[in-house]
Amino acid sequence: MKIGVILVTFNRLDKLKIALDCYDAQTHKPDYIYVINNHSTDGTDVFLKEWQEQTGVCERLVLELPYNSGGAGGFHDGLEVGLKKDADWLWVADDDAYPEKDAFEKLSSYYDTLSADEQNKIAALCSAVINNGKIHYAHRNHLNLSKFKCKFRESSPEEYEKNAFDIDVFSYVGTLIKKTALLEQGLCEKEYFIYCDDQEHSLRIRKAGRIVVVPASRVIHNTPGFDDKGIFWGMYYHARNNLLMMRKHFPKRYYLLKMTKAYIVKASFLSKNDKKTRGLYKAAYKDAFYNRKGIHEVYKPGWKY
């Protein structure tokens, strides 16, 4: 198994250094590490120039983007270059994801146990995501569909006791995607900017084959959740892109019902949210309705109250 690492970073140099050390320490060495610097302003560019010139365990590549294109833009551009390289599997992760030293080995070993026919049916392999010492189940989801509702159901503790299990939706934290699946289903939605780009992408990747979680392979995710950030700019993109994804992949009734309920609860005069929060959600739902993507003129990185 030939693995290429696609790593997107933005203004988290300390975390990036830890992540790069984790890839160098892998028992199953990657063919290359491709770092996409999303126009960081904290000295990341200087560090990466020195890092690229040093001799490592594999090829070192850097893409310096001229502006912050968000995680979606970074992964899109990184995967686009990755498709032109020799590795037949592409590992996607942010700079706050630290794979344990045998993470790649565990994924490769599982894949090698499969027959050629079974291998051909695999589109992606996922590690278990560990946050604060515990499995973060929300990164690996199943689709639950009813007549009027589509819901992502988190993977369960019981599933992680298995050697491997199938899912429908992954995050870009510790996911290994087969190149042939990317060639068939395309890259992530660049114009999402941030949030839900990985979920939307996985809904297409699953059409190319199975998405399998291998619990023995683990990646540490060093990040806080939404609850620690208050009302911030990212909530606009999460709300908008979730509806855009629903609209693209599922029957219209799912999207309309979800938007109606969300608007009443979060954006209408009936909402318990304050005026600024209601305004954020109104903008998100309006843009989803008109299929507007990209960076919002108000809710840019750094906006918060």
Image (cartoon, rainbow, N blue to C red):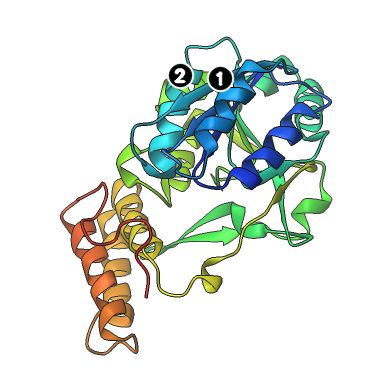
Q: Residue at x 40, y 60 (%)?
A: 234
Residue denoted by label 1: 61
How many residues crowd mark 2 within 10 Å: few (<14), some (14–19), many (20+)? Answer: few
Q: Position of residue 305 (x, y in %)?
A: 37, 76
Mark toward the viewer: 1 or 2: 1
Cα distance between the residues tagged 1 and 2: 10 Å
Q: Position of residue 158 (x, y in %)?
A: 78, 58
Quadrant of the rendering where the N terminus is positioned: top right
59 to 302, vertically: above or below: above
214 to 112, vertically: above or below: below
In the displayed structure image, the side of residue 281 where residue 171 appears, left or right: right
Q: Residue at x 79, y 28 (%)?
A: 26
Examine the rendering and report whether any part of residue 19 can be seen.
yes
Q: Residue type at mark 1?
A: Leu
Q: Residue at x 32, y 79 (%)?
A: 266
In the displayed structure image, the side of residue 230 where residue 302 appears, left or right: left
Q: Residue furthest top?
A: 86
Residue denoted by label 2: 81
Q: Residue furthest left?
A: 290
Residues at discs 1 and 2 in contact (Cβ within 8 Å):
yes
How many residues crowd mark 1 within 10 Å: few (<14), some (14–19), many (20+)? Answer: some
Q: Position of residue 242 (x, y in %)?
A: 37, 57
In the displayed structure image, the side of residue 49 where residue 191 appears, left or right: left
Tell me where residue 240 sits by quadrant: bottom left
How many numbered marks have been drawn onto this rendered protein structure? 2
Q: Residue type at mark 2?
A: Val
In front here: 242 or 277? Answer: 277
41 to 114, vertically: above or below: below
Examine the rendering and report whether any part of residue 165 can be seen.
no
Q: Earlier in the sequence, mark 1 or mark 2?
A: 1
Q: Position of residue 44 (x, y in %)?
A: 53, 37
Considering the numbered disc 2 on the image, is that residue within a helix, a strand or a loop?
A: helix
